[in-house]
Amino acid sequence: MNQKNVCFGAGALRIEDIVRLSRREAKAHLSPDPLFRERIQAGADFLDKLLLEDGVIYGVTTGYGDSCTVAVPAGLVDELPLHLTRFHGCGLGEHFDKPTVRAILAVRLCSLAQGYSGVSWELLERLTLMLNEDILPLIPEEGSVGASGDLTPLSYIASALVGENRVHFRGQIISSQEAFNRLGFQPYHLRPKEALALMNGTAVMTAVACLNFDKADYFSRLSSRITSLACYALGGNAQHFDEHLFQVKPHAGQQQVAQWIRHDLGEIPAERNSARLQDRYSIRCAPHIVGALKDALPWLRETIENELNSANDNPIIDAEREQVLHGGHFYGGHIAMAMDTLKTQVANLADLHDRQMALLMDQKVNNGLPANLSGADSSRASVNHGFKAVQIGCSAWTAEALKLTMPASVFSRSTECHNQDKVSMGTIAARDCVRVLELTAQVVTATLLASCQGGRLRQKMESAPESLSIDVENMLNDIEKEFAPVNEDRALEGELRFWLEQLTEKRWCLYTY
């Protein structure tokens, strides 16, 4: 395991840093630069100074949200953060999985490390401890409207810090107080504003967005490989991916996808293509479909990483100028836009591969392949149905993915006595994208296995089969070690689940491009 540090406070983090931390492929580390520590402490010291001067500070000496006009007596200021963690402990739904919780912890740490939240150095150290020791709060997925940030889900981190939440720790679910005790620590005592700084931000939606981006980038590569296999299996026209053709429509991502497919198909003789001028759109236009996602990724990265490296709570504490700035940086509009966009592009991949799957099954258009890609010999063909039901499954998974592409960001609901009267729904958009990615992965897995079967069937049909690239041949050989040809009908659920894990969790195909 690569334990290279991800350093907080030394510069901007990238999506890949969050992904590595989520997979426990790296350790979190606070910058040793004394100026960084001084900058963090200056914010906490400035708040202490304001409190001594009886300053009015939102969320420190006042109630929260619409209750900002309610003054909190000096004797209750220390209690206020604890109450914030408690009354927001009302999330429902499934709990985020462990990689996502790690990503959430890392993203919140990154925001607080910008030095504009008025938190102490000790809080950053405790969050770093939780990441590195894998103390993972149980965080419900549902309950955030994405402004004031991810209040309810992030409250479960704050409540874990003070010993009032359950956590995953070393294979058990125990109280966070017990987890800290086992490591020789007491639960953390929240300073004024620290609960607000932890909770009043976009860490949940941004963490989920980082993981979604990473998976979508991977799928753009995998979809290109599957298209290559489907094209080969269908006896398709490799000239559709010609380099000179794509020079006249120079979208960089689209050109990259076409180049990947050209690489996979190797040297297909021109005479093979002479009788087949134009393939169906799901083959011919695949670079344009996958390429739209590939071309969206750079600006999606910029948007997500800007949010990742921002101070996004309220109020902002500017210790250098001794200002408390009240604003709305907790608003998740940019992440909402990014995730609504990404889920649409990913769902298009599901739709693409569902159509490719349909072509492979249909004897009217599959250029001589057996019906439903059955590998049965002629005497057994009548009772065997190959991938017929798998293709039906692909259509079901695709329909569900497409249904989820309705933009969540347009469903703002006024809440909290109309203080939060226009909200982002960024966390819902990010969670929708997670589900679209899951469904698309199922379609991708099924189409990959079907395309592999189709490719081998095509090779058997040809007296002198064209050679695919060495990368594709190696992949076919690797798949065949675990996935026998479907010559006689068998239940494929177990194999589909196995390959789904290989492709999505273990990134089995990452060596492809």
Image (cartoon, rainbow, N blue to C red):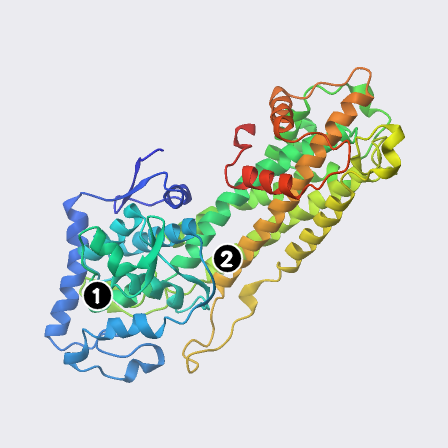
- Return the residue nearer the eye: 354 or 294: 354
- What x and y, as percent, mark residue 401? 64, 55
- Mark 2 Cα shell of 10 Å, populated few (<14), some (14-19), many (≥20): many
Q: Residue at x 79, y 28 (%)?
A: 235
- Mark 1 Cα shell of 10 Å, populated few (<14), some (14-19), many (≥20): many
- Residue 287 vs 333, above or below: the answer is above
- Quote the CA–CA distance across marks 2 and 1: 29 Å
Q: In the image, is 315 to the left or to the right of 228?
A: left
Q: Quadrant of the rendered structure where residue 167 is?
A: bottom left
Does the image show residue 253? no
Closer to the camera: disc 2 or disc 1? 1
Question: Could you tell me which secondary element the residue under label 1 belongs to?
Answer: loop
Does the image show residue 139? yes
Q: How many badges with numbers are in the image?
A: 2
Q: Check disc 2 and report the residue beneath it.
A: 430
- What x and y, as percent, mark residue 388? 78, 43
* Quadrant of the rendering where the N terminus is positioned: top left
Q: In the image, is 411 to the left or to the right of 98?
A: right
- Return the residue nearer the eye: 308 or 198: 198
Q: Check disc 1 and report the residue beneath it.
A: 190
Q: Residue at x 26, y 55 (%)?
A: 179
Q: Residue at x 42, y 75 (%)?
A: 420
Q: Residue at x 58, y 62 (%)?
A: 407
Residue type, label 1: Leu
